[in-house]
Image: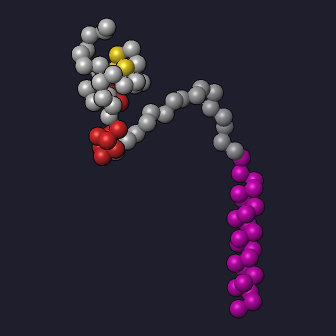
Amino acid sequence: MGHLKLLVLFMVCLLLLRQVGASPMPQQKSVQRRLRRMTPFWRNFSLRPIGASCHDNSECITGLCRKRRCSLNGTQE
């Protein structure tokens, strides 16, 4: 029984040493903006009405974001 505990302790120490010796991931030079993902449930509740501020078409209830505002028609105003 004592040999088993010693073996387990030795294996845990080896695992910890391996983690310490691992090199960090290289830095990415370009910063990529991650798009926001929403489930269909939350997408329906978070749609903005006409005239509300927006960043892209997916945020508006009409699906049209013009000049950072939710628009009713697709023409540039």
Residue 10 position in % (x across, y down): 75, 74
Asked whether, in this view, residue 48 is left or right of residue 8, the answer is left
- Residue at 72% in and 84% down: 5
Overall secondary structure of the magenta section: helix
Query: In the image as oriented, which residue stretches furthest toward the bottom?
Result: 1
Residue 33 position in % (x across, y down): 51, 30
Query: In the image as oriented, which residue stretches furthest toward the top?
Result: 77
Asked whether, in this view, residue 30 is left or right of residue 56, the answer is right
Q: Is residue 71 above or below residue 32?
A: above
Which stretch appears magenta? 1-23
- For residue 59, what is the image quadrant? top left
Using the rendered image of the protein, determine whether residue 56 is visible from the camera's viewpoint: no
Q: Is residue 11 magenta?
A: yes
Residue 38 position in % (x across, y down): 37, 41
Which one is in front, 4 or 58?
58
Residue 31 position in % (x across, y down): 58, 28
Which one is in front, 3 or 41?
41
- Residue at 25% in and 19% down: 72
The N terminus sits in image quarter: bottom right
Which one is in front, 25 or 55?
55
Which one is in front, 58 or 12?
58
- For residue 63, what is the image quadrant? top left
- Residue at 40% in and 19% down: 68
Q: Is residue 22 magenta?
A: yes
Q: Is residue 52 above or below residue 9?
A: above
